[in-house]
Amino acid sequence: MSPTRSGPRRRLLTLLVATVAAVTTALGLASPAFAISHSSATSQLRAAGISWTSSGGCSDRNNPTCTSFDGIRQATIDGIITFKRASGCAITITAGTETGHAGGTYSHWNGYKVDIGLTTCVQNYISAHYTYVGYISGFGYQYRAPSGNLYTKEGSHWDILYYTCGC
């Protein structure tokens, strides 16, 4: 191969790799790079005035009765903080990254989701500001934020999927 042909190919490959990296980062798909510790998450939540509860009174990620934030994505923490600020509602997280939830790429375990308690304030804000998607059989009533994040009312709580840090 001639040096004049390898130069453009190399630049094209470099541009392609950089583009894929930028898109992956922008979409939050590189979850390991964005995962944070339980301690870091609780510090940020506490500073934002967001509380959490655990039916087991613990934070062990491998115990389904605990509420853990180990491995949660920074975008998820930013998302719930943004939601609290935008809505003005009191927020209590009832589930984080602990085992016991459905699996999949965009799961609690992978740091994309949190559950929050039901309140009239949260219900009113979501129904007034987000697009109603419909009833999702086996899950509940789902709303989509302008950011694309999904808020599903699953009976006793809101299950929130944060693709991005916007609410």
Image (spheres, rainbow, N blue to C red):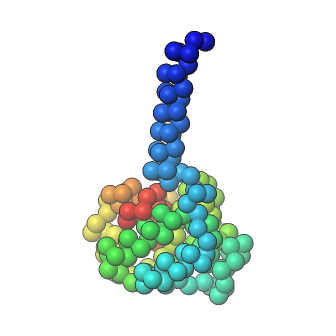
Q: Is residue 135 visible?
A: no
Residue 66 vs 83, above or below: the answer is below
Q: Residue at x 45, y 83 (%)?
A: 47
- Judging depth in this view, the residue of 20 and 80 nearest the camera is 20
Q: Is residue 38 visible?
A: yes
Q: Is residue 33 left or right of residue 50?
A: right
Residue furthest right in the image: 62
Relative to 154, residue 118 above or below = below
Left or right of residue 96, residue 51 in this image: left
Number of numbered discs visible in the structure rendering: 0
Residue furthest to the bottom in view is 57
| Extreme-front residue of the structure | 3
From the top left corner, tell me how far across and down residue 98 is, in percent: 65, 71
Residue drawn at the location 48% of the way across and 33% of the way down: 15
Q: Residue at x 39, y 55 (%)?
A: 148
Nearer-the-camera pick, 99 or 46: 46
Taking the image as shown, residue 107 lies to the left or right of residue 77, namely right
Question: Residue 143's image quarter?
Answer: bottom left
| Residue at the farthest top position | 2
Image quarter (top left, top right, bottom left or bottom right) of the C terminus: bottom left
Please indicate whether residue 151 sits to the left or right of residue 4 in the image: left
- Name the quadrant of the N terminus: top right
Q: Position of residue 83 (x, y in %)?
A: 37, 71
* Residue at x 69% of width, y 77% of height: 60
